[in-house]
Image (spheres, rainbow, N blue to C red):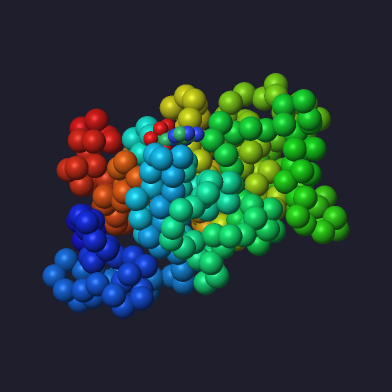
Amino acid sequence: MENMTINRGGPEGLWLSGAAQRGEGKAGSEGAVTPPAAPACILDIRGLTSHYGRIQALHGIDLQVGQGQLVALVGANGAGKTTLLRAVSGVQPVSAGQILFRGADIVRMSPDKRVRGGICQVPEGRQVFGPMSVEDNLRLGAFTRPRKGVAEDIDRMYTLFPDLKIKRLLQAGVLSGGQQQILAMARALMGRPALLLLDEPSMGLSPRLVAEIFRIIEGLKQQGITIFLVEQNAHAALSIADVGYVIETGTISLSGRGPDLLDNEQVKSAYLGM
Ligand code: ATP
């Protein structure tokens, strides 16, 4: 339970919070835990709100992703996970707050510029280009990269994911759900992301494939790729996450080390069916 706090109505005590980093709140007070040697922050979301018309979907989100970390955001259906991820990639309007990427506020930056800056999203539901070949899907993922080096990067993907090499000439649409998820991730990796955003990679997959996808995600993390993962499958996500956040109706209710959150009674009863 060490290094975990419940966030009830204020950022104090929420470790790695933007407020704590700015020296606000009650650093050093009871309940505030400073993790040892926190990595440099690559993504720092501060007080973020977002609306769909009059409906407020996000209510002042504070969340940080450190360089090289795997950070998981878990929560129920409709809690606001996809909205937050889409705000980071720039396709969801933000009403207030900041999204600092490597220290610069990108809230007004176009999605295209964010991709060029190194933020690559694998959208919910995979969304590979079905009529195109596996290899052409990969090539598309490199649209921000200089042409020189793309062939080499495709080879790198084939080494990482040998199944894709075997199926490289097939239309992406004929791949199984799991293979399409792998292709969608490989396509995003072709952009050499500084920050990889994964939206519900386990969605619609069998338990066996979910396990495989999460092994792959863990492998990417071990290669030093910074990952922000949103998932309904709290167990799978928190098991591999350095840091986990729980979102409820657009508010972060809990945060801490991923494995510590797995032991939390509130998380167990609400998200793990225990
Ligand atoms: P899911 O896992 O089902 O995608 P989620 O946690 O990603 O859930 P969001 O899709 O971000 O949740 O939705 C957050 C809130 O915003 C929900 O109340 C949802 O009904 C609302 N919402 C999402 N998309 C729209 C939309 N296009 N128009 C209006 N409201 C929306």
Quarter of the N terminus within the rendering: bottom left
Q: Residue lying at the far right in this picture: please name it.
A: 148
Left or right: 196, with 7 as reference point: right
Q: In the current view of this chain or complex, which residue is farthest to the front?
A: 54
From the viewer's side, name the closer residue of 2 and 61: 61
Residue at 36 percent across and 73 percent down: it is 21
**54 left or right of 156?**
left
Q: Where 75 falls versus 119 (above or below)? A: above
Q: From the viewer's perspective, is residue 99 above or below residue 211?
A: below
Q: Is residue 71 left or right of residue 146?
A: left
Q: Quadrant of residue 167?
A: top right
Residue at 55 percent across and 70 percent down: it is: 104
On the question of residue 243 being in view, the answer is no
Tag count in the figure? 0
Name the quadrant where ligand 1 sits. Answer: top left
x then y, percent, for residue 90: 58, 51
Compared to residue 18, the image places residue 273 above or below, namely: above
Name of the residue lying farthest toward the left:
30
Which residue is rendered at x = 22% and y = 46% of the image?
Answer: 263
Q: Is residue 112 left or right of residue 177?
A: right
Q: Position of residue 136 (x, y in %)?
A: 80, 37
Figure quadrant of the C terminus? top left
Asked if one can make out residue 70 in the rendered structure from this viewpoint, the answer is: yes
Residue at 31 percent across and 51 percent down: it is 252
Residue 177: give x, y in percent of width and height: 58, 26
- Towards the viewer: 64 or 47: 47
